[in-house]
Image (cartoon, rainbow, N blue to C red):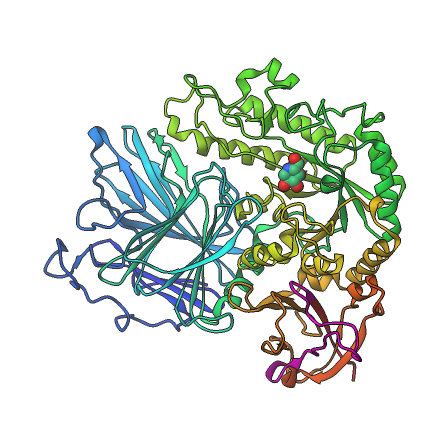
């Protein structure tokens, strides 16, 4: 996969090639990143002509380049390149100049960082070592490739091989100069209850910075971004994806120059970051990912989904179907007792749910969000036999049992705070700001990491929990620990402490399913997915909002990672009412569950849920682990459509979600992709439970069409269109924000 010949470094993935060279001056020049090309003795047909451009000239009569215009793989600082560099270092008296020259390379198997989350399994890694002897620095650029995905993993590290301190003011994990500048930038932005909304804009001249400064990867800006061509669609055209394995402040910058190049850099956000590097010390930057597709956005997403499933998630739940859970949060909020929870659990068992999850409010004196974070012992007024007793009772009903924690947080009104006020993050000169009445524990302090890790893991083991929801409901405000000489190290040190904590707890409890959560989906990133195989996607489970949130999320993260629940018919976030079936249709593609008080539903509603679950269990593997392809976008079309196809193409699920019903609107013709041309498929629509609920229809999965794969994919099937009339059938296909699922199954010959 990696070839080094005649000074060229050629990195091949199954469908792409990434190429750079060491030029005669010892500078790394980027040559090409795109569709796979065969090896060649030289690549002059695509290489930059030496001396293209203007400005200061680096080199001699034999070979010279204008660094400002060249495509560089690793830029030096100051000198001839006026663009921003991936490494900002400050030596004595703020001198910042350095020149990185090639020293050596090595190829090894595997990738693994010492201090940070890392992709894993069957990688081949190229490490290119650069140096500046004057400055005493050695910089290593790592490139890892895998046999089964086009995603390339990069990272960089720097070693101080000199005798003086060096201050790192920026170290990007990856940087390269694309040889073309004309792109549309796609980013995922949002806020609480509207995470990962898709935004697109032409890439402007100058620097565009896509970043988070919230202390966490954040709902405001997810680290995943795409550069695509104007003409790129879901199924065709070029697209490049970038992401980072980091849960803290991140940034990706795109510097588009007048020479029609784009320097793309990704790494830790350099705002409020610096690091003091002592002699002999090494700093490693997080892993960053790159991926190229010439077959549109779907192929890019597909590669990322494969990468996440095969090289990010390592828990034993990696390839498993996830249990259907019921979470009590929106059903009861803080107001529950053991009895009321067991009431929900019994109903849950009756309808076929597999796990009860007890959310916030079970510990200390927590009857509201104003108290007790840090006091991880049960509130015996609510739970007389504690968590252990409740867990036993839930297990004896034949259900799994899971519990909510918010380990990184501390309430000022808690026993933990009263005994350790110094464990909360605080600036020495300012009153700490509260958010949701809470402070953040200082995870730069090893004692805190150890204490909280031990408390949480012993409780999980003692109560024999099957699942943990790991929440985090506020951002970090102050970046301060009085013991640090350099306060700009604080946040990265916090992240190192955080990763140590989650590694410890998840390794102590290898059979437990962990779901990360952060005030909804505020921390959906590849870093945390290395430890917890799924994240709560959003507190907003209104089906319309979810169509938008999930479409954005699915651009990079596969269905099995996305926590998605059916909540009560009246959405608590939007106050919109929807049928349980429309909610189900949207939620059932993810790590699926319910979030309501089942004891408050009537028989008809319970029956609808029971039928959903029976149906879901038949199709769960396909829904959670099948290959996802977007067909129409909620952001640009009147329907949202996608298909999930099994790897052998013997079955698929087609989703159609409507926006607003209009008479004589464009017909809805479903045209799946990625089926087998030769197979004959039977297509059935999921039962029209809505109609059943209204007493107007039958609950059944009826086979509606039999069709050849090729015909289905080319001509499609036109959905029937009916409305209320004096004589007609009393149903209307696709009510406002309604949705349908069509199961497609290969017909046995
Ligand atoms: C925020 C989460 O997103 C919710 O699901 C719930 O767990 C609350 N926190 C509990 O405080």
Residue 442 horizontal/vertical position (percent): 52, 25
Task: Work out whether 663 lies above or below 374.
Answer: below
State which quarter of the image contains the C terminus.
Answer: bottom right
For the point 70% across and 39% down, the residue is: 468
Ligand 1 quadrant assignment: top right
Between residue 609 and residue 58, name the one nearer to us.
609
Q: Residue furthest top?
A: 419
Type of secondary structure dominating the magenta stretch: loop
728 within the magenta span: yes
Can you name the residue that lies furthest to the left here? 61
User: Residue drawn 81% across and 71% down?
Assistant: 701
- Above or below, 471 relative to 18: above
Q: Is residue 243 above or below residue 2?
A: above
Q: Is residue 743 left or right of residue 674?
A: right
Please tell me which residue lies in front, 154 or 227: 227
Residue, x 68% and y 28% (percent of image)? 368
Q: How many marks?
A: 0
Residue 183 drawn at (x, y percent) = 36, 64
Q: Residue 204: horizontal and vertical position, in percent?
A: 31, 58
In the image, 63 versus 496, the foreground residue is: 496
Span shown in magenta: 713-739
Confirm whether residue 402 shows in the render.
yes
Q: Could you tell whether 455 is left or right of 700 in the image?
A: left
* Residue 148 in sight from this viewpoint: no
Magenta stretch holds residue 361: no
- Find residue 671 and report its horizontal and vertical position in percent: 62, 78
């Amino acid at each position: 996969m990696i070839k080094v010949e005649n000074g060229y470094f050629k990195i091949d993935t199954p469908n792409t090639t990434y190429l750079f060279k060491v030029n005669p001056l010892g500078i790394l020049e980027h040559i090409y990143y795109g569709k796979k090309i065969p090896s060649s003795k030289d690549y002059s047909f695509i290489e930059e002509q030496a001396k293209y451009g203007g400005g200061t000239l680096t080199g001699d009569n034999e070979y010279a380049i204008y660094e400002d215009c060249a495509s560089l793989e690793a830029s030096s600082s100051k000198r001839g390149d006026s663009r921003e560099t991936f490494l900002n270092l400050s030596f004595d008296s703020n001198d910042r100049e350095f020149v990185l020259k090639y020293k050596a390379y090595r190829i090894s198997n595997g990738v693994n960082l010492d201090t940070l989350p890392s992709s894993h399994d069957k990688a081949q890694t190229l490490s290119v070592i650069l140096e500046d002897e004057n400055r005493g620095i050695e910089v290593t650029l790592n490139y890892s490739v895998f046999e089964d995905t086009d995603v390339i993993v990069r990272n960089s590290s720097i070693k101080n091989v000199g005798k003086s301190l060096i201050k790192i003011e920026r170290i990007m994990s990856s940087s390269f100069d694309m040889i073309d500048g004309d792109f549309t930038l796609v980013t995922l932005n949002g806020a609480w209850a509207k995470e990962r909304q898709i935004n697109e804009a032409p890439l402007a001249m100058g620097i565009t910075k896509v970043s988070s400064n919230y202390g966490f990867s954040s709902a405001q800006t997810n680290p995943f971004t795409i550069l695509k061509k104007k003409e790129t669609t879901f199924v065709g055209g070029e697209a490049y994806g970038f992401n980072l394995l980091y849960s803290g402040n991140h940034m990706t910058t795109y510097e588009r120059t007048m020479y029609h190049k784009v320097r793309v850099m990704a790494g830790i956000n350099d705002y409020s970051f610096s690091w003091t590097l002592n002699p002999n010390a090494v700093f490693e930057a997080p892993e960053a990912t790159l991926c190229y597709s010439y077959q549109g956005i779907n192929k890019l997403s597909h590669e990322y989904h494969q990468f996440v499933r095969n090289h990010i998630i390592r828990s034993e739940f990696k390839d498993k179907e996830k249990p259907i859970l019921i979470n009590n949060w929106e059903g009861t909020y803080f107001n529950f007792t053991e009895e009321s929870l067991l009431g929900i659990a019994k109903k849950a068992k009756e309808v076929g749910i597999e796990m009860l999850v007890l959310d916030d409010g079970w510990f200390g004196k927590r009857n509201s969000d104003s108290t007790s974070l840090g006091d991880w012992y049960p509130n015996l007024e609510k739970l007389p036999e504690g968590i252990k007793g409740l867990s036993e009772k839930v297990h004896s009903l034949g259900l799994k049992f899971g519990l909510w924690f918010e380990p990184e947080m501390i309430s000022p009104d808690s026993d933990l705070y009263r005994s350790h006020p110094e464990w909360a993050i605080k600036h020495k000169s300012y009153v700490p700001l509260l958010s949701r009445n809470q402070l953040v524990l200082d995870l730069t302090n090893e004692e805190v990491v150890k204490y909280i890790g031990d408390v949480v893991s012993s409780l999980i083991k003692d109560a024999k929990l099957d699942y943990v929801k790991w929440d985090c409901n506020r951002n970090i405000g102050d970046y301060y620990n009085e013991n640090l000489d350099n306060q700009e190290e604080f946040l990265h040190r916090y992240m190192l402490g955080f990763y140590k904590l989650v590694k410890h707890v998840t390794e102590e409890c290898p059979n437990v399913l962990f779901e990360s959560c952060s005030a909804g989906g505020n921390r959906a990133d590849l870093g945390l997915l290395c430890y917890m195989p799924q994240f709560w996607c959003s507190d907003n489970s209104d089906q319309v909002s979810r169509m938008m949130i999930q479409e954005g999320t699915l651009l990079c993260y596969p269905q099995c990672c996305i926590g998605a629940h059916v909540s009560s018919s009246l959405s608590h976030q939007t106050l919109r009412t929807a049928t349980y079936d429309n909610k189900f249709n949207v939620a059932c593609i993810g790590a699926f569950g319910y979030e309501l008080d089942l004891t408050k539903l009537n028989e008809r509603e319970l029956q609808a849920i029971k039928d959903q679950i029976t149906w879901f269990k038949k199709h769960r593997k396909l829904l959670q682990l099948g290959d996802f392809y977007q067909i129409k976008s909620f952001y640009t079309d009147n329907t949202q459509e996608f298909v999930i196809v099994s790897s052998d193409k013997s079955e698929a699920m087609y989703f159609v979600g409507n926006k607003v019903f209009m008479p004589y609107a464009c017909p809805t013709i479903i045209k799946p992709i990625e089926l087998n041309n030769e197979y004959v498929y039977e297509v059935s629509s999921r039962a029209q439970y809505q109609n059943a609920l209204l007493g107007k229809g039958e609950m059944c999965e009826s086979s509606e069409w039999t069709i050849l794969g090729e015909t289905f994919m080319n001509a499609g099937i036109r959905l029937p269109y009916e409305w209320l009339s004096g004589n007609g059938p009393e149903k209307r296909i696709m009510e406002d924000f309604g949705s349908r699922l069509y199961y497609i199954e290969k017909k046995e010959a």
